[in-house]
Image (cartoon, rainbow, N blue to C red):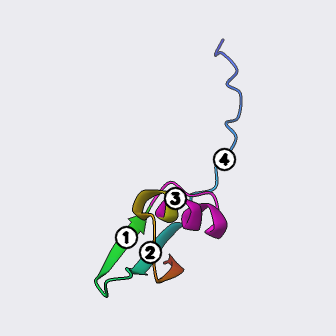
């Protein structure tokens, strides 16, 4: 007799985000965000990492 296996709950894959940052001195950088739950979480992760920014653009990467 085979053991009954419980069905695994399917996890939705996390969305990957890309962020373009421009610093107050005019330099710029791109970030790849892998562990964010949503867009606002991705924004918070980038801002906690880089600090003061002039502009920040975040988009879901497909």
Q: Secondary structure at mark 1?
A: strand
Q: Is residue 35 above or below residue 43?
A: above
State the CA–CA distance, disc 2 to disc 1: 6 Å
Q: Secondary structure at mark 3?
A: helix
State the CA–CA distance, disc 4 to disc 2: 25 Å
x 45%, y 64%: residue: 51
Q: Secondary structure at mark 4?
A: loop
Magenta stretch bounds: 34-46
In this orientation, which residue lies closer to the viewer: 52 or 59? 52
State the CA–CA distance, disc 3 to disc 4: 26 Å
x 28%, y 83%: residue: 27
**Earlier-in-chain disc, 3 versus 4:** 4
Q: Which residue is mark 2?
A: 18
- Pointer 2 and pointer 3: residues touching (CB < 8 Å)? no
Bin the neighbour count of mark 3 within 10 Å (Cα to Cα): few under 14, some 14-19, many 20 and up.
Answer: some
Q: Secondary structure at mark 2?
A: strand
Bin the neighbour count of mark 1 within 10 Å (Cα to Cα): few under 14, some 14-19, many 20 and up.
Answer: few
**Earlier-in-chain disc, 2 versus 1:** 2
Q: Which residue is mark 3?
A: 45
Q: Which residue is mark 4?
A: 10
Residue lying at the far bottom of the rendered structure: 26
- Please check the rendered image and state whether residue 16 is part of the magenta-colored stretch, yes or no: no
x 44%, y 75%: residue: 18
Bin the neighbour count of mark 2 within 10 Å (Cα to Cα): few under 14, some 14-19, many 20 and up.
Answer: some
Q: Which residue is mark 1?
A: 31
- Pointer 2 and pointer 1: residues touching (CB < 8 Å)? yes
Q: Tell me the mark number nearer the camera, choosing from 1 and 4.
A: 1
Bin the neighbour count of mark 4 within 10 Å (Cα to Cα): few under 14, some 14-19, many 20 and up.
Answer: few
Q: Is residue 48 above or below residue 25?
A: above
Q: Tell me the mark number nearer the camera, choosing from 2 and 3.
A: 3
Q: Position of residue 37 (x, y in %)?
A: 63, 57
């Amino acid at each position: 007799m085979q053991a009954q296996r419980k069905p695994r709950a399917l996890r939705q894959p996390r969305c990957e985000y890309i962020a373009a940052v421009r610093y107050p001195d005019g330099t710029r950088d791109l970030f790849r965000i892998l562990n964010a739950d949503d867009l606002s979480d991705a924004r918070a992760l980038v801002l906690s990492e880089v600090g003061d920014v002039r502009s920040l653009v975040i988009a879901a990467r497909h």
